[in-house]
Amino acid sequence: MRDKHHEEVAGLLLAAGGGRRLGGHPKALLEHRGRLLVEHAVGVLRAGGCGPIHVVLGARADEVHERADLSGCVLVDNPGWAEGMGSSLRAGLASLDGTGVRAALVSLVDQPGIGPAAVARVLGAYEDERSLASAAYDGTRGHPVLFGAAHWAGIAATATGDRGARAYLEEHEGGIRLVECADVAEPYDIDTAADLRHLE
């Protein structure tokens, strides 16, 4: 159920990590419900109502290109992926610059417990390029996060290492609209071998 309003919001999927704690197996290439995790995550953004979808790839990007069906997405290669999530966020936001979209809804490839319902809720908080919203789980901020275009430069300037947009969000805590999603999603990460039990 995509409305025209939401065509202004791009889905930005960060899927570049190398899976260091998974023995170097990139999370994008894990399987979940018969599909690669990166395909599953793109499907969630689409079903949740995002307009264009940009996917940031890094570790074994050639293999992801080859094996994953990411048709209709803009694929962004991040050669600096090993620096951490911050570099992927910067690459993704740079890829949106000049496209005409007014906000980015950022999600992570390794959170399959977050589905279209949570994406749609956070998308519903979009008003204009100054919007700043985040899913919350029992009051604790999590993903997905929505950044209006007015915030992109500030986020890119502070996104370093694995902190992503954390520093920017802490600085703008008072302006973030929290959207409770604990009743429709589980924000676990697939980080270690023990977490693989979440995959079906």
Image (cartoon, helix red, strand yellow):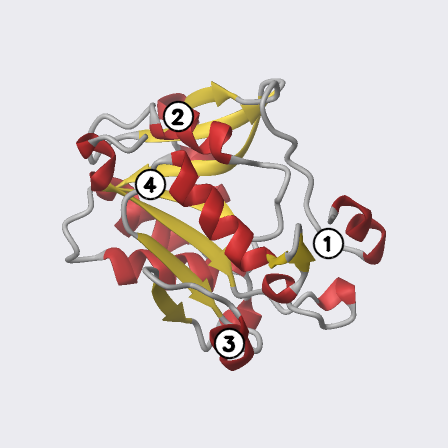
Residue at position x 52%, y 50% in the image: 41
**Residue type for callout 2:** Ile
Classify residue 31 by image quadrant.
bottom right
Mark 2: secondary structure: loop
SS category of the residue bearing label 1: loop
Could you tell me which secondary element the residue under label 4 belongs to? loop
Q: Element type at marker 3? A: helix
- Residue assigned mark 3: 61
Q: Residue 49: which disc?
A: none
* Residue 168, quarter of the rendered image: top left
Residue 191 - label: 1
Residue 115: x and y in percent read 54, 36
The percent coordinates of residue 51 (x first, y second) are 28, 44
Whole-number angstrom distance, CA of label 4 to CA of label 2: 20 Å
Q: Nearer the viewer, residue 60 or 17?
A: 60
For residue 121, side relative to residue 40 (left or right): left
Badge 4: residue crowd in 10 Å (few <14, some 14–19, many ≥20): many
Q: Is residue 132 left or right of residue 183?
A: left
Which of the two residues, 186 or 79, is positioned nearer the viewer here?
A: 186
Tell me which label, 3 or 1, sits earlier in the chain.
Answer: 3
What label sits on residue 176 in the rendered view? Answer: 2
Mark 4, residue position = 50
